[in-house]
Image: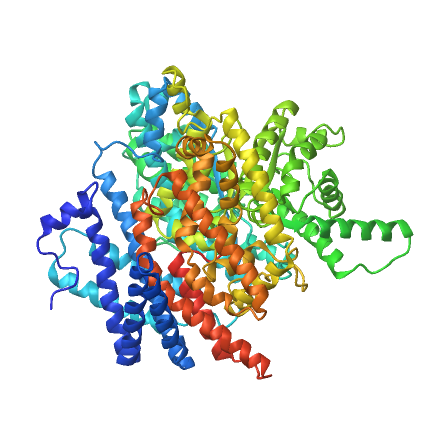
Amino acid sequence: MPSLWTPSNWPQRLAELLAPTGELKEAPLRRDVRSLGTLLGGVLREQSGDALYDSVETLRRTAIARREADGHDPENAAKLLEQARTCVHELDLPAAYRLARAFGFYFELINLAETNHRKRRRLSSQLNPGAAPQRGDLRGTLRRLRQSGATAAEAYELLSRICITPVFTAHPTEIARRSVMFKRRRISDLLEQLDRVPVPEAQLESLERDLIAEITALWQTDDVRSARPSVRDEIRMALDYYESSLFDTLPVLYNEIATALAEEFPPSSAQNGTQSICTLPKVISFGSWIGGDRDGNPFVTPAVTRDALAMANNLLMNHYRRRLQNVFEQLGSSTQQVPVSAEVGDLLDRYLAQLRTAGQTALEERFHFEYLRLLIACIMMRLGATPQSSIPLPAKPALPPYTRAADLISDINAIRTSLIENHGPRLAQMLIDPLLMEVRTYGLHLQTLDIRQHARINTAALAELTAVTGSGVAAALSPQTEEVLDTFRAIAELKKTYAAEAIQQYVISGATGVEDILNVLRLARLGGVSVEAKGDDPGLQIVPLFESIEDLQNAAGVMRELWTSEAYKPLLESWGYRQEVMLGYSDSNKDGGMISSTWEIYKAHRALHDVARECGVALRLFHGRGGTVGRGGGPTHRAIFAQPIDSFTGELRITEQGEVLNWKYSDVVLAERNLELMIAASLDAIARPDAKIEHAEKVAVPHLTGEILPEWEAALDELAATSYDFYRKHIIDNPDTFTYFEQSTPVAELEHARLGSRPAKRSGRKSMADLRAIPWVFGWMQSRQLVPAYFGVGYALDKFVKKAPGNLALLQTMARDFPLFLDIIRNVEMALAKADFGIARLYASLVEDEALRNRVFTTLEEEFNLTHRLLLEITEQSRLLEKNAVLERSIRLRNPYVDPMSLIQVELIRRKRQAAVKGEPESPELNRAISATINGISAGLRNTG
């Protein structure tokens, strides 16, 4: 029987790949989705019988019918929803669990199909070099730079100011277990192989059989963790991305940059007339919070922080050894054929002298004429290994280990220079340049590890230490203070054990004033940490994180006070007058709602840069964005470009939350594209070529240049204030809402889902203030209400539109021409498209107090409907996502498959609560089934929290 991927003819398959637009380009995605669904159906029948398959089909058809009737026949839609709910109500627990898994696994496969299509479309664009570059492409940004009048030297100088640092975090938002992630990658690889043109029929059938086997293996694997992951597990999961994609992505990324520069600024006029990636500036570095972020996570201890650095170091050293082994095997240049440089000769003389002193002469004897191989062997020895060769080598080489990345770079550069000087530039380009770029990027530490703790913990620890010291009486410190002091002692130790650059930042959550920063400086000194930069040690910079709306409004004033302080100036001087400040998206959104949060972050961003310029400080902002819209998520490149104009230095750190890592970094194509988008957006944001072009053309209204007109700023001031007051009144300051939230969402089940090592609350108290932003968004997302993403938006827009006749037209112009407002509108629109108040009403039925339930639900639903109506008016659409066909189709096709899992989740939560009322013991099987619905809904909505 032919494979489901067998084409009617191969030219047609090639045409699909080459199609730039239209239905033809979407045909492969439809085929993948259809074929994977067919294979999953077969696996379900084989593994669990026809009954499960029939139940899946019944619920699927009912959900689709309900969705189709929803817009034109609400009465029938309500009946179909009740019919589906009744069907779920009659399921026994094992059947409900299997059904939830079945729908969840469907989304696992569909997500992989969509990811494969993104890679397919990336390849398609590369096959059509004549096509105009899209916005977001580096080549497109460089082209607009050239059109704005920039020279090659100016473009290079602008690029040299860019440095993007994705910072991986382990907030409890990554649903998938590590074993599931490995299976995803194997299925993804098979889908990619099925895309090749042409493939013999026998091979297609073989690939399909392998695909069925992998789907079967996935079905037989526990999707729900039996135990909460440890921090060490989270560290290992994040490090997996380096081996699965990032190590191989870096050379591809820099080649892409070199090619784009050469295309837009031909080599004859480019820097040194060369396209070598080694002439490019370093535009990417990496960071992590995993193992360093102890804010609210008691499991992050000094020992765990040591583990984080040790694991990163081991991974990197093994990677360098593999790379060098490859160079060693391929580079057999002999001095009998071609000479080496004097620099290589001098280096070898020094290394060989040390080896001879230790009685280690085997390498010198074996590679008598192969000087470059000999030098590579010496470099490998300094990295703690020896090359795999046919001669016996000492277990403990005599050469000292590298302690500075600069020394490793110097040795590798010596090989590169020697090759170039002696007729081997292509060998240098192929073998040495990629390695050199990696060492420049990763150093000897791979990634920086940030340490984070809350301001109140630091303040309490310092107060206790001061009291104990002042009393003159030896007294035992509290465990909390001991942990704080031990953290700084560990930092001091680790900066000597590993590369000092491995720990450079200490982030203070909940920072409100200068004293929070000075407290950490005092604690650091007590712990023996050298805060100032000295030699190769960049020191430890204290990074305040401003999170609440009030703190964002005060941020610039706080930093002015700090930067003008005489006591702080020596620190600034040691850091080269550079300072990092972090802005919090998640908590500010929880605190004040979508518009207020976004606008206050924008204003704080602008004000901080104004103050930095006044004080002569080079400011780097760290953006603490979440995965979902309610936590500052949304397309990263769009958000980077939406920064205030003239308020960006080119350097940027940005958090990459657990749930988006797989979406962005699971393979080389995705990782390279994601990093390219961030680099291009940063170049666009710092250069603003469109603004220069429009100024030259004397355009009256700036279109997507990032410039803000006074009337736009006044409008956002008013919208943010109105939205904030309404949001605070009905959400934060209304105790009914917290009760409604706890009872109408599965937030209590977050514990059983075992998503991450961090507890959902900073303490055991049950209050809105103590609840973290992550479970806050998680609960609303799972219950399909998505309140943080829109509440207050509709009310503010409606009040503004009604205030003056021209205000609607003003908002429509802003939605077309102002990147920040466009970003707000698009993110809210996406959230509205994922929400469903028909399903949400079923979650609301879980609230015990009927009067409270009706009050809160009615408020939420009215605001949802108002936001929906105003958004359509402002975007001039007849339906949500009308202008974003790809996303609209994806959500429209997904929603009917998410609905059954929501129905199952509501039913199981109801059963659990009824059992608790009866005093029955908690059921592990029931918790596991509810966790399966959490997995499935997260996969279906492509968001956890």
* Residue 868 in the figure: left or right of residue 333: right
Q: 19 or 62: nearer the eye?
A: 62
Q: Residue furthest left?
A: 9
Residue 263's image quarter? Answer: top left
Viewed as shown, does residue 760 lie left or right of 191? right
Asked if 56 appears above or below 162 in the picture, the reply is below
Q: Which residue is found at the position 30% from the left and 47% from the top?
A: 886
**Residue reaching furthest right?**
472
The quarter in which the N terminus is drawn is bottom left
Residue at left offset 47%, top offset 38%: 164
Residue 653 in the image: above or below residue 606:
below
Q: So how many labels did they put on this image?
A: 0
Q: Is residue 372 visible?
A: no
Q: Which sits in the foreground, 249 or 192? A: 192
Give x and y (percent) for residue 791.
Answer: 52, 49
* Foreground of the two, 247 or 210: 210
Would you say residue 86 is visible in this rendering? yes
Where residue 174 appears, x then y in whole percent?
A: 47, 59
Q: How is the image coloured?
A: rainbow
Task: Residue at 53% x, 28% y: name it.
Answer: 647
Question: In which quadrant of the rendered view does residue 51 lie?
Answer: bottom left
Q: Position of residue 148 (x, y in %)?
A: 36, 19
Give the answer, above or below, for where 400 lies relative to 414.
below
Residue name at image x 69 percent, y 32 percent: 557
767 sits left or right of 312 in the view = right
The x, y position of residue 637, in whole percent, is: 42, 39
